[in-house]
Amino acid sequence: MSLSLIYARSLNYCIGRDGVLPWVLPDEYAHFNRVTMGHSIIMGRRTYQENNHALPGRLNIVVTRSDDWHLPREVLRAKSLAQAISLADSKNGKTFVLGGTGLFREAYKLADEVYETVINASFDGDTFIDAFSFANWQTTTIAEHGTDAQHAAAFTVLHHKRPQRAVS
C-alpha cells in the first residue's frame, strides 16, 4: 500500500485561513483533482467540514473520534489514521492524506511520497503545516506556473519520493 500526502502551502507554510485556502489557483486545484481522482483520500473532520461534501470520484474517509457526528453514507468513518489506512488498503490505488495538520504530521512518518505545491508568496492565516524535511528524498518538479489573469501567485508543484526503506 502506498501512502501519500498532498497539500499546497505558502512560503511561510500557511495552508488555511478561516477554514478555506487563502488563495484561488484553478490550475493547482486541477492538479489536485488529477492526482487524487480514483484513489482513496483521508482527511480529518475539520478538513471534511471545510469542503462540506464528499469529493467525487474518490473513496472519502474521515478521521473523527465522534460517533454521533453525521456523515453521508458514501463517506467512511475512522477513529484513527491507522484505521483509515486499513479501510483504504482494502481498495485499489493510492491513498492520499489531505489534512489537517495533525494527520499530516502523523502520516509524514509513514508516507512513501508527498505532492507539495509551494505558492510563491506568504499569506496571513491561522493554519500552518510543519516544514517537513525532504533532504534524503528524491524530489522532482512536476510543474511551474507563473501569474496570469486567473492566478495572482506563481506556484511550483513538487513530487517528493522517500528512498526505499530497508527491509529487516
Image (cartoon, rainbow, N blue to C red):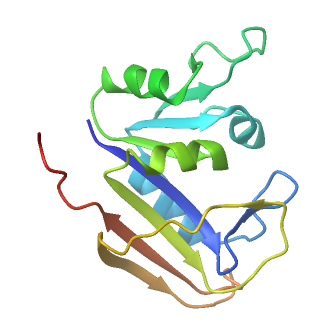
Task: Decide which of 41, 79 is in the foreground and name it.
Answer: 79
Where residue 13 sits, quadrant-wise, is bottom right
The quadrant of the rendering that contains the C terminus is top left
Residue 57 in sight in this render: no
Where residue 78 sits, quadrant-wise, is top right
> Residue lying farthest front?
168
Task: Decide which of 50, 84 is in the foreground and name it.
Answer: 84
> Residue lying farthest right?
18
- Which x, y percent locates residue 114? 41, 59
Which residue shows up at 61% across the image and 46% down it?
99
The quadrant of the rendering that contains the N terminus is top left
- Which x, y percent locates residue 46? 75, 38
Q: Is residue 154 above or below residue 18?
A: below
Query: How many numbered marks appear?
Result: 0
**47 with respect to 63 (left or right):** right
Q: Is residue 14 above or below residue 155?
A: above
- Which x, y percent locates residue 11? 65, 81
**141 with respect to 130 (left or right):** left
Which residue shows up at 67% across the image and 17% down it?
72
Q: Is residue 88 above or below residue 158?
A: above
Which residue shows up at 35% across the image and 67% down it?
160
**97 with respect to 123 (left or right):** left
- Which x, y percent locates residue 120? 62, 86
**12 with respect to 93 (left or right):** right
Where residue 69 sits, quadrant-wise, is top right
Which residue shows up at 39% across the image and 70% down it?
134
Residue 10 in sight in this render: yes
